[in-house]
Image (cartoon, coloured by chain):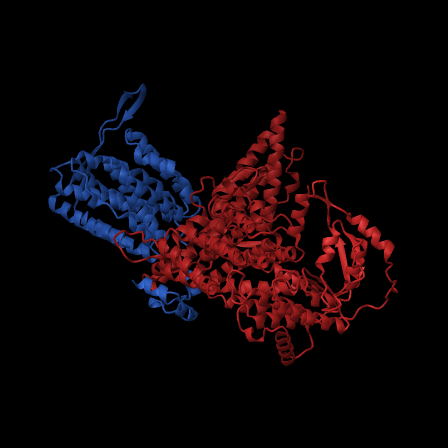
Amino acid sequence: MEGVIGYIPQDDLLIEELTVYQNLYFNAKLCFKNITNEEIVAIVDKTLSNLGLLELKDLKVGSPLNKTISGGQRKRLNIALELIREPPILFVDEPTSGLSSRDSEHVMDLLRELALKGKLVFVVIHQPSSDIYKMFDKMLIVDTGGHLIYNGNPVEAVKYFKQADAQINSDIGECPTCGNVNPELIFNIIDAEVVDEFGKYSGKRKVSPPEWEDNFNKKIKPDKHKDQKETPPKSLNIPNWFNQFRIYTLRDLFSKISDKQYVFINLIEAPLLAFMLAFTVKYISDPNSNLYIFRENENIPPYIFMCIITALFLGFMVSAEEIFKDRKILKREAFLNLSRSSYLSSKIVILFTISAIQAILFVIVGNYILDIRGMIFVYWFALFATAAFSNMLGLIISASFDSAVTIYILFPLLMIPHMVLGGAMFSFNKLNKMIGSNDKVPIVAELITARWAYEALTVYQFKDNQFERQFYNLEKQISVSDFKQVYYIPELEDIVDNCAQGIKSDNDSIKTITKNNFELLRYELSREQKNVKNIEFNFINQLNNDSFSDYVAINTTDYLDKLLAYYTKMFSEASYKKEKTINYLDGIKPGFYNKKRNVYHNEALSNLVKKIYEKNKILRIKNHLVQQADPIYEDPVVNGFFDFRSHFYAPRKHFMGFYFDTYWFDIAVIWIMILLLYIVLYYNLLRKTLKIFIKL
Amino acid sequence: MFRKLFYLIFVSLIIVSCNSSNKNEENISEDIEIPDSIFDDKPLIISEEAMSDIIENISSPVEMAALLKETGVPFSKKYLCDVKRIDKLNTNFKRALNLGILSSDMGYLNMYDKTGSVMSSMSAIKSLTDDLRIGQFFDFETIKRLAINHENLDSLMYISVSSFNNMDSYLRETNRSDVSSLIVVGTWVEGMYFATQVAKTAPEGHKIIERIGEQKLILNDILLILKNYQNDKHFYDLVQDFESIKEKYNDVKITYTVGDPESREINGMLIIVTNDESHVEISKEQLTEIVKIIEKVRNKLINL
């Protein structure tokens, strides 16, 4: 039954920003596949002239409040949209309400023509004029409660009801002189009220609907028709997915462009916000100087976070009403059986383009003012991904709710979690115990786009800028070896000593502590074996309450000493290399190193990603030792082939045995989230879930 | 005004930004090739024995500051090194030297009860120790105690010396004695700087002048240590500086008279006190010369 039915609703479902011609044109393009553009134009023009709309064709449709064309003209356009494809079965709801008698006749003539062509046209009509009444072949009257009380010729109906009411001239249907029929008579008869003894209407009907129905069934037997086996012909030949997509996109584009206010605000908003933000936070630390030094601007980390929040907000606002405001049109086009995915894709393409433009304008202004150099693509891509995510979220919301106000009420609910769990305002290790975590980013935060974008940008800004790039690997070695020799290995040595004492005790609680200590040792030492492959340790399996002995203790301590020597050497080599490099640079280009550092390196950001204010450099969590210091130099702890979780500010991420640079990995995660949201959008999962909840 | 102008023409910036950021002054974005040959020198290997002797003999900054206060010369901010300078220190060599200098400054501030200024010194010291990767010995608590608690001089000295000893043995274990040497050198130079500046206006024959003279012995020890590292250009320059200081000390005479040991009871414990006396002969001209050379070396070091 695809494409067979057409429906013209009572309310007009028009695209208000487009012209009369454009409305019809795009609709036609969506209905007809194999027709050339010239032919489409011809059909559109013909339909417009049939409905008397040809002179208005370039006028914007406008809203009922902001009228450009009259109500009657709107109605005719509404009809034109469906008429143009001449569906085999057409349902029309009150086509003549609000039209002049001349226009009404025009419209009914067209419908009649359709019927004569062999189409089936169902019309709901009120107060038809006599001429129009007589145009119909058949009339159905359905009384309150769904009772069919008449099905047959309209003029005969007058006679039937007059007879039923025992009126005098019940054999007269239409006036023999003028041919006039009065359909109102029928309704007067149907719901005539009982008159009480005072002569007043009592409010109760003389004949109830079931009685009318009975009466009809007794008096008139409907003709029996044979059951049809053939399917009705299709009048629809919809274009393929890609063409649909193209048409949707063009239509949406034209409708957006025609609203000058919309275009202007959208373009100006992003750079204006960037200017406000960047200008305000451009901090110069020396009160006596007007020279801005990037390195000394303490506001850079919060600035980055604000960029992300801004992108989230902008993305959502642009898309929040998109599907909602199309809902009338979607209702109409439901009968065309067009592809939902091509509609959604066109929306997505347009919104993503807007987001991309807004992001680039924002980044250019912001980064210029704050002198963030060489990062335009990086910031743009991260903000674009964030805004795109917000676009998808907005589309889902706009498709799932029934009023615009509900959509905006939801806005804080969707955005505040990003601010709270983004990792910038509250540290992940200083949250409620049930949410926060000391070793990895909390699971809840893994769902928050802002956290991924923020980590991506801060890590990239610190690690991959023009200055730090040269030194990062050396600094990483220095950091790792320093941590191991100052905190990690001494802690392990203490634990080994505790174990050596602990196994001698018979106290149960000490035994448990020792057991836990052994578990820690086994875990940490096997990690170290993977990290430092050329120092062997063969006693891992003896690190437990039963097999531990002084011999094992000595060997373990020996292993730790070797590790210590290894890391000490690593430290001094890396430290030496770094020192030499800086001396070399200072030698051949004095002051260059410091100048470059002032331009590309930011002290506040560096302190943030190195967590220098963290008091505890190492923590024991259950039976693991967790590094707290220098997260930017620490590779993630991997607990499985698919384990991709890590601590915040990790320089690389692990997945399936490979290490990926944090920036690209994090942005890829955002795109995966966007993909998942698309699936939710396509299957309208949110709306369906809400329905279930409301039923409960 | 420039920024407001920019706001109006943001569109043109789209085009400008496409030309990337290579128009900066001096092409700051350029990456300079680091030739592998510079890494060919062996890292510094040193002998550790000399170090512990020196540490004991070089007065801790606290001791020196106490002496200064005794002279009655008022506090002067101009003796201090500018804390903001530490931003420019990019190598461990410079950092270690300046850490020593700043420690002396902090001792001086502490002695004169300038606890307000002590705070900015503290954060500078913390930053330097973190960069030198010896932050574990200088947690804020320790520094705070050193900075604010000036009632009990003995305990203060104990804290500062013991912290330093811990740090020094760690550095020795990890082959980084050069760092402790430089810290000591920095402390000494700054301490001498205070002493010599104060000595300019101190009363004749004051103990501080004697102390300045006594440093001749320490100088030899310092030179011994520094010469260990002479292969490195920066250490070599430092050695030259100290040689020039030593030169000015050539005519200063120190004589010892060995006295009889004496047993005394202090706090219920039996202590043996040696009554050695040392006598320093240092003329006014010699002092002036020493003051000048110390000034010169110290100013050179703080401008590295």
**Image location (x, y in percent) of residue B218:** 26, 43
Q: Who's the residue at 68% across and 78% down the image?
A: A35
Q: Is residue A604 above or below residue A125?
A: above
Q: Nearer the viewer, residue A545 or B54?
A: A545
Q: Nearer the viewer, residue A523 or B23?
A: B23
Q: Nearer the viewer, residue A55 or B130?
A: A55
Chain in blue in the render: B
Q: Residue furthest bottom?
A: A38
Q: Who's the residue at 31% across and 36% down the image?
A: B147
Q: Is residue A80 above or below residue A297?
A: below
Q: Quadrant of the C terminus of chain B?
A: bottom left
Q: Is residue B63 above or below residue A284?
A: above
Examine the image and state in which quarter residue A391 appears: bottom right
Q: Residue furthest top?
A: B268
Q: Nearer the viewer, residue A105 or A165?
A: A165
User: What colour has chain A?
Assistant: red
Q: Who's the residue at 51% across and 40% down the image?
A: A431
**Image location (x, y in percent) of residue A226:** 88, 65
Visible in this render: residue B62? Answer: yes
Q: Is residue A298 above or below residue A560?
A: below
Q: Is residue A696 left or right of residue A252?
A: right
